[in-house]
Amino acid sequence: MKISNLKLDEIFHTLVTSDRGLDRGEATRRLAEFGPNGIEETRRKPLLLRFAGQFTHFLAILLWIAAALSLLSEYLHPGEGMGMLGAAILTVIFLNAGFTFFQEYRAERALDAMKKMLPFRVKTLRDGLVSEVPAADIVPGDILLLEEGDRVPADTRIIECTSMSVSNALLTGESEPVSRSSTPFDGDMLASPNIAFAGTTVVGGSGRGAVFATGMRTEFGRIAQLTGTVTPGLSPLQKEIVKITRIIGAIATIMGLLFFIIGQFIGRTFWDNFLFAVGIIVANVPEGLLPTVTLSLAMASRRMARRNVIIKTLISVETLGSVSVICTDKTGTLTKNIMIVAETACLGNDPHGNDEWLHTVGMLCNNARELDGEIRGDPTEIALLREARSARVRHGGLRIREFPFDAERKRMSTITTVDGAPMMLTKGAPESVLAICRECRIGGRNVTFDNALRSEADRLYGMLMDRGLRVLACAIRSIDSAEAVTNSAAAERDLTFLGFIGLEDPPRPEVAAAIRKCRAGGIRIIMITGDATRTALAVAKRIGLVQKGAVAIEGGNFERMSDGDLRTALSEGEVIFSRMTPKHKLRVVNILKEEGERVAVTGDGVNDAPALKRADIGIAMGLSGTDVAREAADMILLDDNFASIVNAIEEGRAVYENIRKFISYIFSSNIPEIVPYLAFVLFRIPLPLTIMQILAVDIGTDMLPALALGAEKPSPDLMQRPPRSPRERLLNLPLLARAYLFLGPIEAMAGMFGFFFILSTGGWQWGDVLPAHSTLYLQATTACLAAIIITQVANIFACRSFRESIFTLGFFSNKMIFAGILSEILILLFIVYTPAGNALFGTAPIFGNVWFILALFALSLFAAEEIRKAIARRYCSGGAVE
Amino acid sequence: MRYQRILTAINEHVQSEIAARYALQFAAAAGACLDICFVEEPGHQTEHGQIARAAAERMQNRAKAAGVPCRLLYERGDPLTEIRRIVKTDVVDLVFVATRGEDVKRRFYTGTMARRLSRGLPCSVALVRVVHLGRIHPKEILVPLKSRLSHAAERAAFIAVLSRAFDSRVHLFHVTRPLRTFFHGEMHLTPLEWDQRLPADISRFIEELNRRRTAHERRLAPGVAGRVISVEAAVRRHDLIVMGASERGRAGSLLRGNPVEQVLRETPCDLIVLKPVHENQ
């Protein structure tokens, strides 16, 4: 039993109130107990704590320890550059934290938009007197006085009303006003005509009601609560980055500790071993990865903006690429949201025999109006008016009275003087209009609307629906001048059925191709529409959304289905939800997510907000969407067009592929950074590469070329592949093997060759100890660093594709690559040939012949990779080519 | 377990009257007697006393109409002391008490009246938080369950009676910690996979419910208990949440948070926090 079931006295009894309202003392007590009537923010982790969280994850802790040890070393052994290293590591920590936070941060403004939807002051009865109080002070049991134009402040049971109608658009998405009454109602409370919900607007009449829920316990508050609390969880990319940093962090720590212990065993000093351990950790950790990922996502979001998609959180760029299901609205997204009259039909031999009168009803029982040369109003009525004008309807009319459309009657009627005679003109849903018709007009004559003709009308109606048309039935009746027409029930009777008008919202022309693309890319599309099943199915067939027998689930059945049944239905190939309201979307999204799908969902209304928040990607409509939907969404479609979603998904997939490319690139340079340390410990040679030089590569020279890889064009077959499996790793074994066992060793060879080449030409003998500041040593480490950077120049071409030859891709097809290489070379020249660079990175200028030798290594890497790709193309399938 | 005498405490607040309605329906379904008790504290405003007495009388009339044997008890003194005395003297099995605004504003587990009653009474206590006056008979009851459940038999008995009282559907809901590994982070499990990990205590509770022929659905979800419970109730439009009282002490609540407190704050529907004492009777 709910409040909507109760009679007047039971309402007062239940709410412990009376028709005089509450007394002020009781109102004050209830306010203290139930709290203010308003939208409250749910408690979230403060921004500062969320930012602090970026400094306490596993990798950050590792780097904190390394920085602390470096600074301690500087204190114990001043002048050996460990202070600078400590500062550099701290910079890396802050840089990474800043970039990660920037990726994840999103201002939560959806609730702010919702707060503005409640009124500030309302009229209420207190102690039997009308008083205006702040809406925040309304409590359960208060009696509200509602008039046209008022916003309802709380969920209210109507106790008396006069011609009262409200707009529930905020809650149901239905723009048509619905009439209110005070009589008990046994159905669902949300559909109850005796309830006025918080946030809705009184659009006609007036009434009184008793408040039964306030604040966050109203239906509106429930949406606000869900909008504020539901989250999609970590994005696939965030999860992968956590995994990568943990794996790399663990490898770095284990290697550091292991070689520290080995060093102790073979008799190196503690200090040398410590230096080595820190070096190994720094060399292993890809310090530049997070900034590069963030910048790459930012670049992709700019590209998407050019394709009518605004991305609100950077991380969503990549999440789009992993989407496996799109739950989409129909009207406006798959279709143009422009109604046109596609067909008229009536009973009898001539299907167009009643067209003149059908158009007359369409024109005169219509509220669309021409303003400034433009017809404005409801899209259906605009279409009817346009069609009537183009059909040059002869009849004119003067409206006497109107019975507006409402959701219960599902029809609209007017009493209009047509050619001097008053007539009842009615249009509406066929099941509603046919039920009140007594006759029908065939061949210009009125005949009894018997069962046979009714069956014929039903068949005609079904036929039009199967063509994907929204069907209206039209009927008329002559009104006797003496007839007293008091209300719609008295007026809308004994009508003469004229025929049907079939309207169509044409599909967007680009949608069919976008759906084919999704189908090829293994992405399921689930249409969720308020339309009737047959109309929805017909449209779906027309745009290629369904091919075989689709499962169609209607809103009523949906509510009765258990989660298990729904899960089974959703596992079928093609599913369409019809007669649905936005409140159903969240459940669909939840079930799909529980099944491991990565879900994108479209929405425009306030009550779409929770589903938009819960989905992996919430997509709000830029043209028709409410502020709340836009704030709750991850991305906004500027043109409301489904095809733009598919474009964005393609861009997202390209981003993921490109992130893998630059991870290969960044990880390749880890090996030439690690090998010098291993050689230093195991072969007792001078350290070939200092920690500052490692950082010069990781957060200096590697960054811009890696970003250029992030701008690679998508592979042509990108949308031919299925969505990547949630089990697919960003950093998988083939990728690691290519970086660590193939590209990395070539770079390491180059680095070590450059180091020993300088030492041997400078007269160094095995076992000689070189002072840290000797020119020969500085030049040797410089050659090692230069070798790594030069081979990375070649590596950037290698990493542009996992299996395609650079000659196929085209050398100049990504011009940003050359900007990246230029930056790399300029940084290298700064490090090698300027006093500032020499001082900062412990380098010294090297001669031209060294560059020539290092260039040969770069060419070797390039050639070796081309050979590997050729072998991969010939012998390996797609998955194992990295 | 059979509840034979149920007491409900009334005061000047409307919530206590709504809580008493729950007690009345419960008593009717359990075939128990109902004691409606108002304890006037020293210094209490006269007006408050009158409001409470009026509410108690309304409840008595309802009880008569429902055919539930009922007594009105007006006492003076400290509510805990007086109610404890009545519970001991009259062998009360279960007490229904409404939570107050202070229980939500202040930390619930740091010394509110509800806390005192829950801790200090020698019988089972059902603390009722009333937030929505429109759902008069809860049709959908959400029952969040912990992995480790004490008093499974009494909890099941309570749910069974409540479900019978309102002819409601029962939805068992277990919030479990997400499955995580160091290198892989959070693992995704489908509902079926979660179902296979149903804790033994919950299985025992389900057996108890089955024994009482109480139909139910069950669901498991990973997450942070307090938040997930209130979201679940909001998403599925449950009318009432019934959960066990927290066994976390003050220090534990301060350090690790308290799901019961969080649900008390955020619940979108009425909430009953049950502290059972009868073990396997």
Image (cartoon, grey):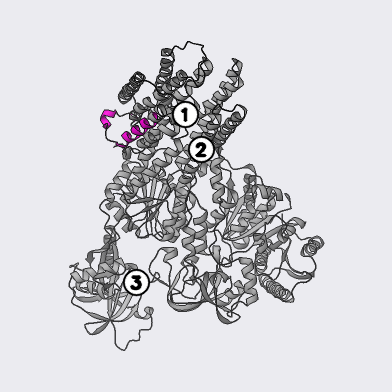
Q: Which residue is drawn at 57% across and 80% down?
A: A19
Circle nearer the N terminus (1, 2): 2
Residue B164 % position (x, y) = 62, 60
- Rounded to the nearest angstrom, the CA distance separating label 2 from label 3 is 68 Å
Q: In this view, does A648 lie above or below B117?
A: above
Subunit under mark 3? A
Q: Mark 2 points at which residue?
A: A91
Magenta segment includes A810: yes
Q: In this view, does B250 lie above or below A720?
A: below
Residue A280 % position (x, y) = 52, 25
Q: In the displayed image of the protein, which residue is found farthest to the front?
A: A835
Say if residue A732 shows up in the picture: no
In screen coordinates, is A363 left or right of A104?
A: left
The mark lying in front, picked from 2 and 3, is 2
Callout 1 crowding tier (Cα within 10 Å): few <14, some 14–19, many ≥20: few
Look at the numbered disc 1 and give the secondary structure of its residue.
Answer: helix
- Judge if badges 2 and 3 mark residues of a common chain: yes
Look at the numbered disc 3 and give the secondary structure of its residue.
Answer: strand
- Judge if badges 1 and 2 mark residues of a common chain: yes
Magenta segment includes A206: no
Q: In which quarter of the image is residue A350?
A: bottom left
Q: Quadrant of residue B96?
A: bottom right
Which of these two is toward me, A320 or B218?
A320
Callout 2 crowding tier (Cα within 10 Å): few <14, some 14–19, many ≥20: few
Q: Mark 3 points at which residue?
A: A411
Residue A839 shows which numbered tag?
Answer: 1
